[in-house]
Amino acid sequence: MSRLVMKFGGTSVADLERIRRVARLVAAEVETGKQVAVVVSAMAGKTNELVAWTDGAGAAAQGLPASDDEYDVVVASGEQVTAGLLAMTLRNMGLNARSWMGWQVPIITDDAHGKARIDDIPPEKLGAALDAGEIAVIAGFQGVDRQGRIATLGRGGSDTSAVAIAAAVGGACDIYTDVDGVYTTDPRIEQKARKLARISYEEMLEMASLGAKVLQTRSVELAMAHHTPLRVLSSFVEPGEAPGQGTIVCDEEEIVEKRIVSGVAYSRDEAKISLFGLPDTPGVSSKIFGALADANVNVDMIVQSHARSEGAANMEFTVGKRDAARAVEIVRAAQKEIGFEDVQSNEDVAKVSVIGVGMRSHAGVAKTMFTALAEKGVNIQVISTSEIKISVLIDAAYTELAVRALHSAYELDKV
Amino acid sequence: MSRLVMKFGGTSVADLERIRRVARLVAAEVETGKQVAVVVSAMAGKTNELVAWTDGAGAAAQGLPASDDEYDVVVASGEQVTAGLLAMTLRNMGLNARSWMGWQVPIITDDAHGKARIDDIPPEKLGAALDAGEIAVIAGFQGVDRQGRIATLGRGGSDTSAVAIAAAVGGACDIYTDVDGVYTTDPRIEQKARKLARISYEEMLEMASLGAKVLQTRSVELAMAHHTPLRVLSSFVEPGEAPGQGTIVCDEEEIVEKRIVSGVAYSRDEAKISLFGLPDTPGVSSKIFGALADANVNVDMIVQSHARSEGAANMEFTVGKRDAARAVEIVRAAQKEIGFEDVQSNEDVAKVSVIGVGMRSHAGVAKTMFTALAEKGVNIQVISTSEIKISVLIDAAYTELAVRALHSAYELDKV
């Protein structure tokens, strides 16, 4: 019998009425004869409330070690509430359901509290419950470490819970959210954005990591590694209405009609750090990025250029906005060793990217991008590429303009 | 090294500022060299919020079996939050602390979800943590059944958690609440009420079951059974201020100066059911109270009297107010079998009681009570007695008058 893991995010379970709507969607899948597990997030807003309390009680402000394990205890309670309420609601409809906390499944994680990774999900107990015809309602976002303490997976972790559970029990995974699929770009910026019927894992991975917030990156990685059939669809349907087909995320081979570019993504979460007057000698980069790596600062785009003065170079790179001040501090602390003249930080930047597996076999993709941006007078500050995407850093004020120009240049508005 | 379990109720941990106040009280005990475990309730109001959600999602309204196990999953999350926040706050003060959920200790209960009883608390893990100098912050009100599912102990269950843990690890138990001890009567009714320095377990048990809401009845029973030193004191002290001595609940032998009467309690939670025209034959009582017992209705006071008509009797008894309508239904359904003429229910009644271990050895206690009430024109409807208390049922309108008259008659206002 086929198994399905359905995942519902915070807005889908924000109140009792929406939880009842979720219960009807679950019931419809059960009626088709599937074995169903459901993964739920906390009610929208609850996690923020809990996090605010931990901020108030937390140790970080005093320079003492953070209580990440206790943070997890507090924050994981949100999913516990939703799991219990949904199980009650399903029973209220005459269905056989029970809730599962992370420690009951168990979803075993490492002990990196607050951003734990799932190590193992022994499938025996959950599989037996599913075989017995029980709907398993599982608290997302949480697990238990090997010391028996509650651990959370970090924001958006419920997607990862759902995919990991689907992989463990051998089923497909449907991610229900407040949009009805993955779009060629953000429909709030480009009204002509179209819903994609299918997208490859790799493209989805780039979309997710480049700022399209539909799926959590790690969940896509996990689905790709296990070839777990993944689907994104909307829970916001009226009673009696079907949720539509959504977008299927799958192996590249399962996509018949390939496009060169599948989507345009953007992110305003990065800041640009510029170092001026670097010595043009070997080993400089390793000093800079070694110091940042030691401090756990992730660097994304990097570009090096020759400076106006002879024998000196400039270096520009991007880091997450919340790491920007720290990155400048770290670099300043190593100024003597690195030997640069000046450092500047700029947060008014946006990264705009075009993504598509078709790039592998088609030339001219970059040219189309640069031409389209040049025509609109958008200046490119930094460029980075991978096999299936091209990203450019631009002035943040041009974000919407650039997204629309690229969407049109690659004819993404056309079916 | 001596061990202490400190328990803080919902109003004592209602917000972060109060949690910090609790942390300071804990720190003060740790400084005296004690090994300290702390048991916390949910933040005031949180349990009600969670219960309201379960009412909305619950099955009771539809005639389907109640989801008491899922109710427990939802409601137990409140204590989880407080335990995590207090552990963080203690660490923030540089102390060594960690939180414990019921399933982690483990606090093993039966499977009577929503009103579970503690079966066992294996002391090994908790004891080892205390020996290692760690403050154990334990979520009250919750445990885990032998199937590994979360169970709650019912309202007020955190007192019971605290005493059971003190008994398991061999320590004293301080119950912090919003009053600074046990009083001779409710100070809101009688301003001259005095705080008792000591009270026996048995008296406290009667006080608790007769309506003085300072301690949960089961927690007192448990303390009595294990001779656990128990103390009631206030958490509402200013920073730097000591919480006072509170009231010590102990074995009768440890109380040097015994009084005949220690306190006056009252309860408006009962209703009186009157049956008229009963046949004056053997077996009638057993039919009535058998039917009520089968339906799980607890009967408290009972009085039987002869009716005006020959060969017939009347019966009056009290039940909890929320059971009153059901009790009348049950009796009516058995009217033919029992053979009474009429049944009436009256909710405008109050039970007023005087309690004191000294009654065992002193005569005339009842006379003082009845005289004092008669002098104020208070009519007694039903009387019940035990070895250490006398209760009377009166018109609810006279409650305050009766409490004050009795408090004065037994000279409880005098030191």
Image (spheres, coloured by chain):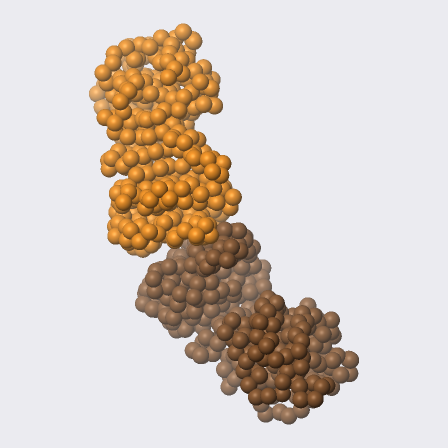
Chain colours: A brown, B orange
Front-lying residue, B363 or A238: B363
Query: Residue at position x 38%, y 31% from top?
Result: B245
> How many numbered marks, from 0 up?
0
Residue A367: which quarter of the image?
Answer: bottom right
Front-lying residue, B370 or B63: B370
x then y, percent, for residue A235: 55, 63
- Which quadrant does the C terminus of chain B fall into? top left
Q: Is residue A20 visible?
A: no
Where is B389 relative to B30, above or below?
A: above
x then y, percent, for residue A400: 72, 72
x then y, percent, for residue A126: 35, 65
Query: Residue at position x 43%, y 66% from top?
Result: A112
- Left or right: residue A313 compared with residue B58: right
- Left or right: residue B67 compared with residue B147: right
- Which quadrant does the N terminus of chain B fall into? top left
Residue A113: which quarter of the image?
Answer: bottom left
Query: Residue at position x 34%, y 64% from top?
Result: A146
